Amino acid sequence: MEAVVVDAGSKLLKAGFAIPDQPPSVIMPTQMKCVPEEAINDLKLSEEITVDPIVRGFISDWDAMEDLLHHLVYNSLGWEIGNEGHILFADPLLTPKAVRERLVQMMFEKFNVAGFYATEQAVLSLYAAGRISGCTVDIGHGKIDIAPVIEGAVQHIASRRFEIGGADLTKLLAEKLGNSNPMVNLRIEDVEKLKELYGRCAEDELAYEKFQQSCPNEQHTLPDGQVINVGKEKYAVGEALFHPSVLGLEAHGIVEQLVRCISCVPSENHRQLLESTVLCGATSSLTGFESRFQKEANLSSSAIHPSVVKPPEYMPENLSQYSAWVGGAILAKVVFPQNQHVTKADYDENGPAVVHRKCF
């Protein structure tokens, strides 16, 4: 049986058996809807609540996470109780040691897995692009991670995490659209869809300013029949990544942050990092983002000018949205056959801390 690879994000969980040249077979929302026990007893099934097992990339509700993974492996992927296989997890950048230890503990004590491995999303995303050295810029639902990687090792001292992401851009768009369409009642799910359909990056800051002065509106009919006008607001989504002041934040834009990360690495490594910048996370597929990113990088006042690399042609379409999962599928083909993973015997002998010795 192939190993299962799991990349659990704040919004979506990507999972499936390790087949590297295919997209993950399961992509499902991480957020769960639960009905309190007292509501079930009273047949008040409408009193459901939402639970977020993962917030800003890290597991925050372990009971909910266990339920989510149980549904994934036994229902969606068809594991049989008593005949569980290997599992590989993609770790977010700077995952606390305690989180890693609790995850491996859950895997062996609750799921009785045959073997466990975990490594960082940045390394896996580079593997998917055919690299072992480079920089990843991962724009997730709840965070942005920027990580230089040299020979498969994340340079943590030079890495940066920013707790803004796609969810914050959705809120920004909701605010902008609410101001320009005061009579329309917007749900956050509707704004998410509008962001996916209309969100744009202007070619440069000058073009963005021009669109703020004059931009034709497009009409969109919402599922409930309301009609909304979308115009200059759609460019704020992308501009916030390059100028966080659009979000009301005093911070450098995403390209400047990447340049600062690379400058923290010894200069002899700059070239191999510069030549292999990988953009990943669903927000990086925003229309015009890659070309704007490369243009800003070329105009950087620093001597460091990152260059975005394209994934190999044989990789699945929309790779940036699940590159860590694909990289995990590649790595699973190596670590489990070569017995580099954490085994049940390792866990029984050394406890959860063994994960730090065997997983890099």
Image: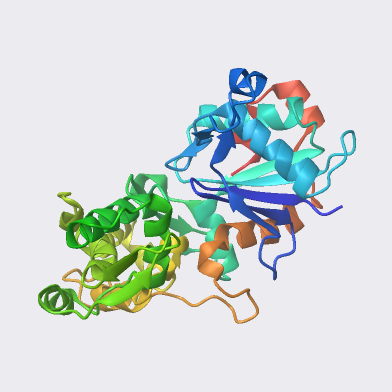
Camera-nearest residue between 77 and 189: 189
Q: What is the quadrant of residue 300 in the picture?
A: bottom left
Q: Residue at x 23, y 65 (%)?
A: 236
Q: Note whether residue 304 is visible.
A: no
- The answer, for residue 6, to whether it is visible in the render is yes
Would residue 24 appear left or right of 30 to someone viewing this image? right
Q: Which of 274 and 314 is in front in this view?
A: 314
Give percent across and percent down for residue 30.
56, 44
Measured as percent of width and height from the top left, residue 244 is found at: 20, 56
Q: In the displayed image of the protein, which residue is found farthest to the front?
A: 225
Q: In this view, does 237 lie above or below 250?
A: below
- Residue at 43% x, 53% y is 189
In the rendered view, tell whether residue 346 sits above or below residue 217: above
Image quadrant occupied by the C terminus: top right
The percent coordinates of residue 310 (x first, y second) are: 49, 77
- Where in the figure is residue 287, as x and y percent of width and height? 37, 75
Residue beneath the point at 66% across and 66% down: 23
Residue at left offset 61%, top offset 52%: 28
Lateral position of residue 270 relative to residue 85, left or right: left
Q: Residue at the left extreme?
A: 213
Residue 54 lies left or right of residue 298; in this view the side is: right
